[in-house]
Image: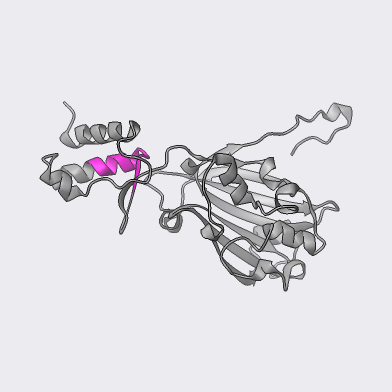
Amino acid sequence: MAPKWRELADRLAERIKTGEYAPGQQLPHIRDLVEAGEGSKSTVHAAYKALEVEGLVTSSRGHGTVVRQQAPMKRLGIARYDKAKWRDGDEVAFIADRVASGRAYRRDEQTQSVSLIEAPPAVAAAHGLPAGAEVYARARLVKEGEQPTHTLTSYYRPEHVEGTRLVDPTPGPAGRGGGYRVLYDAGFEIDHMKEELFARIPTAEEVKLLQLPAGEPVVELHRTTYTADGTVVEYAIGVHAASRFAWEYDFKVPDSAQGGKAAQ
């Protein structure tokens, strides 16, 4: 026979799956379920913790226990960097993901801080800089409503971005078209990029910042962006809540035997 907390967790899970409790909706306070005869305080607390571990809800101080968005957002691959989106329009990468997913967005859902720092070893190596060289770090936290989805920190050579909107900490993209439009206007048109992905256990700071449920991993992204002549104009590191994105890539299959460039 299942313990009472498991029975309660299963009943609540069924209500979530049928839509009785919708994504973003707060579950009843523990005391309300206790008063409704669903069990003791410890029973209800254990049921809520089980739902959190199973990825159905998130719990945080001040927000209570809230049903998670179950349909992950599309995180586009090649298409999110389409020049027509940012050069000719104002659809920066994180907004392109929202549009493709049918999700609402606000430009100020991206916040940032900008600082001039000594380049970490991986950043210096990517930019071909000597140890101790300085770079600008533009660190962003992106949210969907009140829910953080990911962080992204871009590192730039000072001579590429000094005096541009990329060193402005104002929330939201760096003006119309975002960062790639800023680089384009400065004479650094992006031509190709490399992305590397791997999953790992989050740090305690990341769990807090991204409001991650217990046991959820993160996907770390390393992005290197080049101009046509091979100049690195951005090296970026992103940390994404694993369950909040579905990664999508659509590309032409290379055939190096025909003289085409093989994909990296």
Q: Quadrant of residue 107?
A: bottom right
Residue plotted at (46% across, 37% down): 71
Quarter of the picture containing the N terminus is: top left
Residue 115 in magenta stretch: no
Residue 2 position, x and y percent, is: 18, 29
Residue plotted at (30% across, 59% down): 62
Residue 192 position, x and y percent, is: 77, 47
Q: Is residue 5 left or right of residue 35?
A: right
Q: Is residue 243 left or right of residue 180?
A: left
Name the foreground residue: 192 vs 204. 192
Name the foreground residue: 215 vs 29. 29
Q: Quadrant of residue 54?
A: top left
Quarter of the picture containing the C terminus is: top right
Residue stretch rendered in magenta on the structure: 47-58
Q: Is residue 55 left or right of residue 117?
A: left
- Residue 185 visible in the picture: yes
Residue 49 in magenta stretch: yes
The answer to whether 1 is drawn above or below residue 172 in the figure is above
The answer to whether 133 is drawn above or below residue 24 in the figure is below
Residue 212 position, x and y percent, is: 41, 49
The answer to whether 54 is drawn above or below residue 60 in the figure is above
Total label count?
0
